[in-house]
Amino acid sequence: MNAPHMRRPMAAMLLLTAAVQMWAAGDGMSGINQATSMISGYFDPGTKLIYAIGAMVGLIGGVKVYGKFSSGDPDTSKTAASWFGACIFLIVAATILRSFFL
């Protein structure tokens, strides 16, 4: 048991803690808004980078598929499908991420 003279300081301490938390939450919201604007500024260059990586993967895949096709390798279609799928995945992933976050 709490004595009656101990309840007032505890209540004051709880009110002070609540006030500090509300003050800190206001600063947290401005920080979150600032971080959101900074991150959304990186999406255009990031999307272009993913498209460039997709183009490089497509070129490398085209060369590999051409090499397999020229040598008469029987699993050329499987290799072409996997490289083409990787390129499509990169393009779709960049587009979905951009539309999801912006």
Image (cartoon, rainbow, N blue to C red):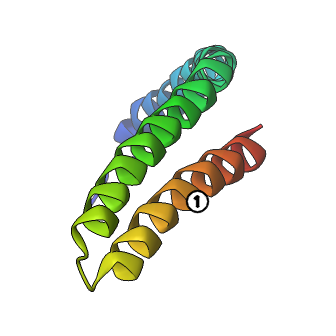
- For the image, the number of numbered tags is 1
Residue at 26% from the left image edge and 86% from the top image edge: 74
Q: Nearer the viewer, residue 55 or 67?
A: 67
Q: Label 1's element?
A: helix
Q: Is residue 7 visible?
A: yes
Q: Nearer the viewer, residue 11 or 30?
A: 30
For the N terminus, which image quadrant?
bottom left
Establish if 50 lies above or below 64. above
Task: Find residue 57 and report its image quarter.
Answer: top left
Q: Disc 1 residue type? A: Ile
Residue 41 on image: x %, y %: 67, 16
Q: Which residue is mark 1?
A: 88
Residue 35 on image: x %, y %: 58, 19
Q: Nearer the viewer, residue 57 or 68?
A: 68
Q: Is residue 11 visible?
A: no
Establish if 61 lies above or below 55. below
For the C terminus, which image quadrant?
top right
Residue at 46% from the left image edge and 74% from the top image edge: 81
Residue 30 horizontal side relative to residue 71, left or right: right
Residue 34 horizontal side relative to residue 8, left or right: right
